[in-house]
Image (cartoon, coloured by chain):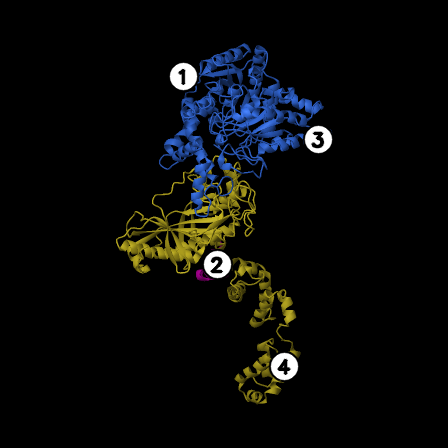
Chain colours: A blue, B yellow
Amino acid sequence: MTDLTRSTAAQLAARIADGTVSAVEVTQAHLARIDAVDEKVHAFLHVDREGALAQAGAVDEKRARGEKLGPLAGVPLALKDIFTTEGVPTTVGSRILDGWVPPYDATVTRRLKEAGIVILGKTNMDEFAMGSSTENSAFGPTGNPWDLTRIPGGSGGGSAASLASYQAPLAIGTDTGGSIRQPAAVTGTVGVKPTYGGVSRYGMVAFSSSLDQGGPCARTILDAALLHEVIAGHDPLDSTSIDAPVPPVVEAARNGSVAGLRVGVLREFRGEGYQAGVLQRFEESVDLLRELGAEVVELSCPSFDSALAAYYLIAPSECSSNLARFDAMRYGLRMGDDGTRSAEEVTSLTREAGFGPEVKRRIMLGTYALSSGYYDAYYGSAQKARTLVTRDFERAFAQVDVVVAPTTPTTAFPIGERADDPMAMYRADLCTIPVNLAGNTALSLPCGLAPEDGLPVGLQIIAPALADDRLYRVGAAVEAAFEARWGHPILEEAPAL
Amino acid sequence: MTVTELVSYEDALTSYDPVMGLEVHVELGTKTKMFCGCATTLGAEPNTQTCPTCLGLPGALPVVNAVGVESAVRIGLALNCEIAEWCRFARKNYFYPDMPKNFQTSQYDEPIAFHGYLDVELADGEVFRVGIERAHMEEDTGKSTHIGGAAGRIHGASHSLLDYNRAGIPLIEIVTKPITGAGARAPEVARAYVAELRELIRSLGVSEARMEMGQLRCDVNVSLRPHGREAFGTRSETKNVNSLRSVERSVRFEIQRHAAVLGDGGTIVQETRHFHEDNGTTTSGRVKEEAEDYRYFPEPDLVPVAPERAWVEELRSELPELPLARRTRLREEWGISAHEMQSALNAGAIDLVVATIAEGADPAAARKWWLGELARRANEQATELAALPITPAQVARVAALVAEGSLNDKLARQTIEGVLAGEGGPDEVVEKRGLRIVSDEGALGQAVDDAIAGNPAIADKIRGGKVAAAGALVGAVMKATRGQADAARARQLILERLGAAE
């Protein structure tokens, strides 16, 4: 490992800009790191060596011509394999897209390229982003760099693991119920779910349209903010994209402060199912906020008790419809097309072979929940619960500026431990799901290691919709205080691979 | 399949009261599709007007076509509907290979327009009011072509070709309330409704609404109930009835078929049926054992549509004069009967006549040419009147030449023939073909003198007072001038020269 792979994105960008290192050298260093460790970690599904070097070369040429470079030009990035990339395979962690090479770039992909960011490759994920461990990938699990026998979180386990194993300084994830924040928490990295509509969903393969949100992943708050600014902003191709200026996230990340801030702590996020070490680190975080000058207010959001149930009706319902297009007619896997079968039979065989068990489970759940006669009881009630969650957040944010909570109830669990217990798996997103239901914004950053297992614990900061900058202001202050206390970033305590 | 002897139409109506429901899909003539920027040009090479969105590629998202929404609101207003203050799109989920996403983006319980009506005029001038339940926005599917099966049906086909050019083209689905009280005139009402709706759509300029091009497609629901009963009977739904004549025939057939089944003590199966243009019958399609479950839910990829009231009122104020009102006004201006106006409507001549009058022709002459000679030629060529290569201005010019005495009817027809043959405008054709009536005294006098000289016996008869014989000499003059003489003037000259009087 070289200092290039240990550097933050901000440091790399500065060095590339002043010419002390070339973008190609930076990319080569990260490709070498991937070669060295990814066989063990399995963060990447596809490494685009040539594309990455070409993109890096273009940045170097641009600099040589004296053109102005963007704030992250030349910095490598790991892209979750849920974003379409023109000419580069996109699998969404599923066999069903076997052989599909998208003819178009997602808006996020396009913005990354335009910013001169070097896309190293596509990262592993739970199939169609359904899962909290990356074990549901059709291409095998990803290991947590802190302990390769444990899960790196999910669905964006590949993106988080690539950061924690220094294969990339930046990554992109998507967060439908916690798929950015929970992997960040269990890998000791930073992940942000922007306000719903803050980052374009165009070209992001849909799981649950009303909940899905792409966002930045990084090792530091500032890096996440720099990336946030690149990918956020209105996109006319996404009708749900917010047509408003991007909140000043970078400025906030450079000016961390919590003085005078009112911070809410929720009664609902504790108790049964929460690991003692997670709660301990969370309490310490709250104490730290007080020390830094914040006023802590205890709040209750009773509707959050039904958030998980509502989520597991809404998300499967939308997914059952979103995934209907995978029918073997136009792209991807096609099974049984031997001239003897009807189109319907080919579709059926393909879906049988192409989707994994969790995806099938959710398609069936959703199909059932939307069925006539059951719609009101399931989908309808879930929407009502969603409205209540949103109102509870509104009431909370009438009293406080941000809410803090554990990101996930436990530290990284062993691979295989919850594979046969979907409910246990779903509980990993207990603290993150309400944010998606309400369309708010939230961030997870490391707040220490759990004493009992030495694994990272995440602190979640939640802000109202459109106040993404508030997350970075608070996050930067907390990050600085913790690192001052620890003497180094938490990741430096991770074992060498 | 059991073959049921049909009951005569009259007998069916003696026992039963028909109830209809019509669902019409109108393909809007927008430049781009409903949810993406792809072109909508008809007849393009298959799959050349597609993009990630209308192909349903992973990750692609829809964006609503503002012109599509505006068209829907205008149609709703023209149908006297209320316009929703807030409505959403919904996903209608079902698998079909020509539907790229395997759901159709449509509207469900929140249509953009609802609770309206359309007045339709029957051939005898009676006006029948058809209630409109709703008009909603949705997208078209792609097109499947089945290869190797009989008559393009999927059954027995070896494979199918899919063309997604049509996928995503905006559709407005217009659903009537149950149409009751039409009695024996039900088939005529159904036809008149679709015809009036087509006129309405065209007058708004939102679609050409050509049924033969699939731009206006009709599903016809029919049920019967015994006279005096409130509750509706079980309905059948005849799909894709795609001409006005077929709408009328299919309703008539279904009334007879239902009556036969019910009369035998049978029950009508709720099913979709196919109409056969060749023999005017319907056959069973898919039996709807239970209502298909489309699992509708609000489309999360689109934001709600909330037409501002001020905008809606602006659109309302900008609506053109609607077709029925216009025809009623024109009937008065032209002094014609409801039946004559119906003929003009059926011939597609109204706009042409109006335009010809605007070019200076009098209404009678304008109607005469369009509905007579030109309608005959259009019919011969199996083309629409408006497609003939002659303009209202040119027809008006022909009428003017007749009015000033430069052409007679026969010469006028020849002039029109020349214009249609591409020989130029009316004046050019008259000039090139030398069609102008010969009325100058010199040429005509010479022809008269020649006729008298060439027919001395007839001339003598006339001199002797047999004026009726002058016709023969006029005939000779006309022959000599190849029909271009002013016949009345020729007769006058003949009588003058022979010293005879009428």
Amino acid type of the residue that numbered disc 4 sits on in the rendered structure:
Ala
SS type, badge 2: helix
Within 10 Å of disc 1 (Cα), the crowding (few <14, some 14-19, many 20+) is few
Alpha carbon of mark 3 to alpha carbon of mark 4: how far?
A: 93 Å
Residue in the image at 64% along x and 30% along y: A115
- Which numbered circle lies on residue B447? 4
Amino acid type of the residue that numbered disc 2 sits on in the rendered structure:
Leu
Mark 4 and mark 2 residues within 8 Å of each other at the beta carbon: no
Q: In this rendered view, identify the residue nearer to me: A89 or B108.
A: A89
SS type, badge 3: helix
Alpha carbon of mark 3 to alpha carbon of mark 1: how far?
A: 56 Å
Alpha carbon of mark 4 to alpha carbon of mark 1: how far?
A: 120 Å
Give percent across and percent down for residue B221: 37, 50
The image quadrant of residue A347 is: top left
Residue that badge 3 annotates: A62
Left/right placement of residue A359 relative to residue A86 reads left
Q: Disc 4 or disc 1, which is closer to the eye?
A: 1
Amino acid type of the residue that numbered disc 3 sits on in the rendered structure:
Lys
Q: Disc 2 or disc 1, which is closer to the eye?
A: 1
Residue that badge 1 annotates: A272
First to last magenta residue range: B326-345
Question: Is the same chain shared between marks 4 and 2?
Answer: yes
Mark 3 and mark 4 residues within 8 Å of each other at the beta carbon: no
Q: In this rendered view, identify the residue nearer to me: A480 or B501.
A: A480
Give percent across and percent down for residue B263: 27, 55
Q: Vertically, is B118 above or below B428?
A: above
